[in-house]
Amino acid sequence: MRSSMLEALGSDHVRTAQAKGLPARQVFTWHVLRNALLPLVTVTGVQLAYLLSGVVVVEIVFSWPGLGQLALQSVQARDYPVLQGAVLLFAIVFLVINLVVDLLYTAIDPRIRR
């Protein structure tokens, strides 16, 4: 976040906004922060996806009942419909996370059109 903030602070459009006489708060909010948030949103979305994949391991290690443990038990019992449902639910959650990241992109960056 720090490096993207420093990169956004040194860009031409920020200097132009400061030269126009805009208040520092408005320059920071509209010109610097919005451009610096894009890498943060990307990394957060990827980390949430990794967190979703790690839930299976955590449930097995700590013996917590959950969807990961259900998926593992259905593999061992060869219960394919339950396994397909668990995989489908994981995929839907992953797709929803990516959709939210893409929608946040359109809200943050005005250059991206819907």
Image (spheres, grey):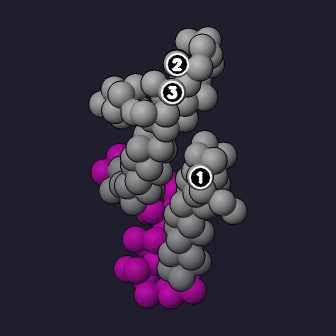
At x 43%, y 40%, the residue is 40
Q: Would residue 43 appear left or right of 3 to someone viewing this image? A: right
Q: Which residue corresponds to mark 2?
A: 19
Q: What x and y, as percent, mark residue 112? A: 60, 56
Q: How far apart are marks 2 and 1 (CA)?
A: 22 Å
Give above or below for 70 relative to 37. Answer: below
Circles 1, 3 touching at the beta carbon (< 8 Å): no
SS category of the residue bearing label 2: helix
Quadrant in which the C terminus appears = bottom right
Residue 17 image-quadrant placement:
top right
Give above or below for 83 relative to 102. Answer: below
Q: What x and y, as percent, mark residue 29? A: 59, 23
Residue 44 image-quadrant placement:
top left
Looking at the image, is mark 2 or mark 1 earlier in the sequence? Answer: 2
The answer to whether residue 32 is visible is no
What's the magenta region?
Answer: 60-81
Q: Is the magenta stretch mostly helix, strand or loop?
A: helix
SS category of the residue bearing label 1: loop
Q: Which amino acid does label 1 sit on?
A: Arg
Q: Which residue corresponds to mark 3?
A: 16
At x 45%, y 24%, the residue is 15
The answer to whether residue 72 is visible is yes
Q: What x and y, as percent, mark residue 43? A: 39, 46
Q: Which residue corresponds to mark 1?
A: 111
Magenta stretch: includes residue 64: yes
Circles 2, 3 touching at the beta carbon (< 8 Å): yes
Magenta stretch: includes residue 75: yes
Q: What residue type is labelled 3?
A: Thr
Q: Residues within 10 Å of mark 3 (few under 14, many from 20)?
A: few
Q: Which of 88 and 75 is in front in this view?
A: 88
Q: What residue type is labelled 2?
A: Ala
